[in-house]
Image (cartoon, grey):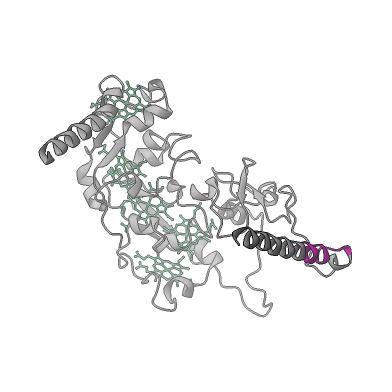
Amino acid sequence: MTIKFIRSFYLKVAILLAFALAAGLWYSAPGRAAEKAPAKILDPTDPNSILYLDTSGKLAGTGDPNKPASLFYRAGQGWHPKALAESTLPKDKYGLINWVESVKTNMIRPRASIDPKEEEMPPMELDIIIEAKSDYVNDVKYPHWIHTYWLKCEICHDTKGGAMFIPQKGANNMSMLGIGEGKWCGRCHGKVSFPLADCLRCHTVPKGAKK
Amino acid sequence: MRGKASLLGALLLAAITAVPALTAGAGAPAVLKLDDKIESMKRAGVGPVNFPHARHEKLYKCADCHPKIFKEKVNTSDISMKKNMEGKACGTAKCHDSIKAFPLFQCVKCHTNVKAAR
């Protein structure tokens, strides 16, 4: 009885496998290949590849947010397609593109809008010194100029669900702990702009310096 | 019987905790509490740093750190976040400002008693 059962069980499995194999062969038959989506490029040196390398030549990311992040990503240094790395744009200390230098030196001049009728708003010159709650660490100079070069006021001061920053000096009760966890400046820095690890790009005003 | 078991347990526990301390370098405890800048830390909402000396010894030679980067006496090297972010102390090149170790903005990885961030 048991032997008979095992026999028929294996038989069933064998038949199932045979079917699966046949289906697989049919699916991957040359005639069908044309119907399939274009194959993904996996060569990391190809700029169209879904795999890319960082400046040190290590795998930077797979393009899949569910996969574990690369070492560079975990170091706060972000994703980094090789194609961009090899451009002649200025780089920061991590080898990432320095977009501030790129516009200040006129190496790139992006349009204000894709709508040709929209008038360009000149960037606003207003630096705000934010005191760091430490006896040693440099204070932070927040420059409106570079932010309003790229962004509209509403992005920070009139965000849906409450302003990201109340437009009043000292009114926001920020902290570096919160920033490190992705609040305040950390909503962008480390994600769409230079990494938080680059402390001294924000902490520029020595304690006790004339403000 | 119970008493004996717990005594044995306690001895075992003591032995386990003593081993890393004994195998550490010339006199350095397994973990050092760094807190000479405690006043400044309180302002930022963080507590003392528990520096796992033993774990670092496994990865590096004494001379990688002493005396170039740190003095061989706890709380005498004048470490601050200012120095860390200037590429000194913990933030020395190839340390906590590189892909070899976690970055400096992950405050909770080094500091204890970290307040809930606002």
* Magenta highlight range: A21-30
Can residue B75 be seen here? The reply is no
Residue B98 image position (x, y, % from top left): 49, 40
Residue B36 image position (x, y, % from top left): 21, 37
Tag count: 0
Q: Is residue B40 magenta?
A: no
- The quadrant where residue B55 appears: top left
**The N terminus of chain A: image quadrant:** bottom right
Query: What secondary structure characterizes most of the magenta part?
Result: helix
Residue A18 image position (x, y, % from top left): 77, 62
> Outermost residue toward the right?
A31
Q: Residue at x 67, y 80 (%)?
A: A117
Q: Is residue A5 above or below residue B68?
A: below
Q: Is residue B30 above or below residue A56?
A: above
Can residue B49 be seen here? The reply is yes
Please state if A117 lies on the left or on the right of B10 as rendered: right
Q: Is residue B95 above or below residue A156?
A: above
Please state if A54 lies on the left or on the right of A135 as rendered: right
Q: Residue at x 38, y 49 (%)?
A: B106
Residue placed most toward the observer, B12 or B114: B12
Residue placed most toward the observer, A158 or B93: B93
